[in-house]
Image (tube, grey):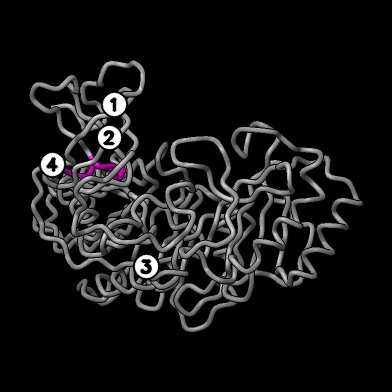
Amino acid sequence: MPEENEAQAIPEGVDRLREVTISRLGHDGDGIAEPVAGSDIDGLCFIPYTLPGERVLARISGERGQVAEIITQSRDRVMAVCPHFGTCGGCAMQHVAMDAYVNWKTGLISRALSQHGLTTPLEPMTVAPLHSRRRAILGAKRGPHGVILGFHEPRGHRLVDIAECPILSPEIVTRLPALRELLRPLLPRFAGSTGSAKGDGGLRIVATAADNGVDVVIEGAGRSVGAAEREAIADISRSARLLRVSLDRDPIYAAAEPIIRFGSVDVVPPPGVFLQAVPDVERAMAERIVAAVRKTKGSRKKVADLFSGLGTFTFPIAAEAEVLAADSDKRALLALEQAHRRAQGVKPVTTLARDLHREPMSAKELDGFSVVVFDPPRAGASEQAERIARSKASAVVAVSCAPDSLARDLAILTAGGFKIESIAPFDQFLFSPHVEAIAILRRTR
């Protein structure tokens, strides 16, 4: 059976205004209009910002549509919380009531599991609150009236200039004017008239609300930024009370080192390194992982934390057990090591720099660990899961931001003798199609 996005396309042609009924939501949150008997729509049509049960008048072109009028409105439709919604592509689901939104997101995980023969019930989803995301990746370019700073339009390349964002931390939102000023010395040299933030002379800015202030990375300016521009950036950074500003990985201004706390340990993140998006949700995830480690039997517990990054879960786990932190990002591991040397009250932590996709840890290497935690990128880690399944580990914690790859990896582990104890969903990316989950498994044979 083909995936929804692989459905037969409606024949291409001029835009057509058609009345359709939305039957369900797709993986990306678009409403799906089924073919109607006797109509010239002979395949699925995806219409953003619609809900199941709604009748809409839509302008159809190919397999996509755009709402012209909502004829019958769903009871699950609510007012968006942001004036940029529908123009800015940062959010896809602000028009959905929270109960329906949560059911849809948990359904993404349940359907992925069922496709691999897994039917474990899900625990209640932890949802990020508004104004909580600590990291924003914004596009920037020169516009006719100054610096355009924001997100791309839905499925397009045009940048939408944002004045507010109900998702981001206020620490970042209140500094949007300062970030525009920060980019002004650079954008005359890297200005593009249209298109995306990268590849047309635009820049990309990564703003992170650390525990002690805002850290900024400007990407795409290259190494040819002169002394005068650097001095101007430093002056603006000082006025805006930014912690650190870097051009790519090169810090050019630092009032203080940014601090991120994992468990009881303070870590200094290198410029642009990966972080979980929402601190409250991150802590809830860490608490769940630590509880699984604590429940595992054994007088001397050792945990392998694979794809560890900066130590997001390493240090909370280290309050309970010895940890091996393995990752391909050497900058992240160095920051982790430095933080561990300063830390008090945690058990030993060692590190391993390795690309776990190209060279997964073997079953023999994992035999000495009672618990294996792995948190791979979206593609998952099927080869690593196979080796975990052949190891002597008694428990596994699988953390994932992609339901399809999570379900595949869990199927590998269950075939290798593990049983799923629980699966809990976490929503760090509010109003987006992305959802995370933590699965805890115990060995049965």
Residue 247 appears left or right of 121: right
Residue tagged by mark 3? 128
For the magenta stretch, what is the residue range? 24-31
Label 3, label 2: how far apart the Cα atoms are: 27 Å
- In which image quadrant can residue 24 be found? top left
Q: Are marks 3 and 2 in contact (CB under 8 Å)?
A: no
Residue 28 placed where, x, y %? 31, 43
> Disc 1 vs disc 3: which is toward the camera?
1
Q: Are marks 2 and 1 in contact (CB under 8 Å)?
A: yes
Residue 256 appears left or right of 304: right
Residue 293 appears left or right of 204: left
Q: Upstream in the sequence, badge 1 or badge 3?
A: 1
Q: Upstream in the sequence, badge 4 or badge 2?
A: 2
Secondary structure, magenta segment, majority class:
loop
Label 4, label 2: how far apart the Cα atoms are: 26 Å
Q: Which mark is residue 116?
A: 4
The 10 Å Cα crowd at callout 3, few under 14, some 14 to 19, many 20 or more, is many
| Residue in the foreground of this view, choosing between 245 and 367 | 245
Label 2, label 1: how far apart the Cα atoms are: 6 Å
The 10 Å Cα crowd at callout 4, few under 14, some 14 to 19, many 20 or more, is some
Q: Are marks 1 and 3 in contact (CB under 8 Å)?
A: no
Secondary-structure class at tag 4: loop
In this view of the protein, can residue 15 be seen by the observer? yes
Compared with 146, 175 (above or below) is below
Q: Which mark is residue 80?
A: none
Label 4, label 3: how far apart the Cα atoms are: 28 Å
Secondary-structure class at tag 1: loop
> Disc 4 vs disc 3: which is toward the camera?
3
Q: Which mark is residue 63?
A: 1
Residue tagged by mark 2? 46
